[in-house]
């Protein structure tokens, strides 16, 4: 056989395979990297209308005065606390408290060495979920006109001011993403006025990766193997 002709046919077959493989990946449900699509909310009503199947942590199973150590767990969530931009290094960890407005009668506050049971302005809280999630919303119990309150995740961030309340004495931040994430950080930006408590965190649903059907996955692997063999032959 003419060498040029043979190589031309092989290159044509390789090109066809290179087009077919991505199509099989997409059709099979195999994960394909993509840019996250993120929608942010500062209205709990709009956030709840856009989500479903979420878990609400209201701290109702806690007891007043119960502490959460830095890196400790409450219910299913793991917490890390930071003094952040606040110059007073008094934050020891978290505390379940009944001193402030909440949905359940209890909320998450900061355990300050000076005796207060709330987070100071500039303090931050990082919450890690037991499994990756797609949606998170958080209520901050705040004073009116006390600065900006932020929710940050690996996929994006959202902030709300405190000029008006979302409900009761709470402001709200929420994120809905097409790409799962493992943790979020809550913080305030006004060091002097931005104290807060967390009465509720909404999160979920658990993100589960698509699993291709066995026959489709086998076809995908076979195509890859064939592509490798033909590439070696062509290079000779």
Image (cartoon, grey):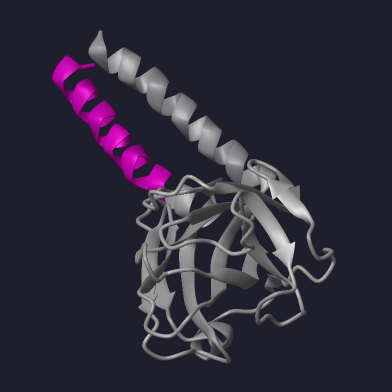
**Front residue of this view, candidates 57 and 69:** 69
| Residue 187 figure quarter | bottom left
Picture mark count: 0
**Front residue of this view, candidates 34 and 176:** 176
The reply to whether the magenta stretch includes residue 4 is: yes
Identity of the residue drawn at 55% across and 49% down: 91
Residue 154 x, y percent position in the rendering = 42, 52
Name, please, the residue furthest toward the left.
4
The rendered magenta stretch, by its main secondary structure, is classed as helix
**Quarter containing the C terminus:** top left
Q: Is residue 18 visible?
A: yes
190 lies above or below 229: below
81 lies above or below 197: above
Name, please, the residue furthest toward the front.
114
Residue 178 x, y percent position in the rendering = 47, 64
Residue 192 x, y percent position in the rendering = 37, 66
Identity of the residue drawn at 43% across and 85% down: 144
**Front residue of this view, candidates 192 and 96:** 192
Identity of the residue drawn at 40% across and 48% down: 33
Residue 181 x, y percent position in the rendering = 52, 53
- Does residue 196 appear to the left or right of 71 in the view shown? left
- Does residue 142 appear to the left or right of 93 in the view shown? left
**Quarter containing the N terminus:** top left
Q: Is residue 181 visible?
A: no
Identity of the residue drawn at 65% across and 82% down: 101
Magenta-colored span: 1-22
- Does residue 81 appear to the left or right of 9 in the view shown? right
């Amino acid at each position: 056989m003419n060498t040029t002709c043979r190589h031309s046919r092989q290159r044509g077959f390789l090109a066809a395979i290179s087009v077919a493989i991505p199509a099989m990946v997409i059709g099979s449900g195999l994960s394909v990297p993509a840019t996250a699509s993120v929608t942010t909310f500062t209205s709990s009503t709009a956030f709840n209308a856009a989500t479903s199947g979420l878990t609400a942590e209201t701290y109702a199973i806690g007891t007043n005065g119960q502490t959460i150590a830095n890196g400790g767990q409450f219910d299913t969530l793991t917490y890390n606390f930071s003094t952040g931009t606040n110059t007073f290094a008094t934050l020891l960890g978290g505390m379940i408290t009944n001193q402030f407005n909440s949905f359940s009668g209890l909320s998450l506050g900061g355990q300050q060495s000076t005796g207060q049971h709330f987070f100071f302005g500039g303090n931050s809280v990082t919450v890690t979920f037991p499994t990756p999630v797609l949606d998170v919303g958080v209520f901050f119990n705040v004073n009116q006109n006390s600065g900006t309150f932020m929710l940050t995740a690996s996929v994006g961030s959202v902030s709300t001011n405190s000029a008006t309340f979302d409900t009761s004495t709470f402001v709200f931040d929420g994120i809905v993403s097409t790409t799962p994430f493992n943790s979020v950080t809550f913080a305030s930006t006004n060091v002097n006025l931005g104290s807060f408590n967390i009465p509720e965190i909404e999160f979920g649903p658990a993100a589960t990766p698509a699993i291709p059907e066995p026959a489709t996955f086998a076809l995908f692997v076979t195509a890859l193997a064939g592509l490798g063999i033909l590439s070696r032959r062509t290079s000779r």
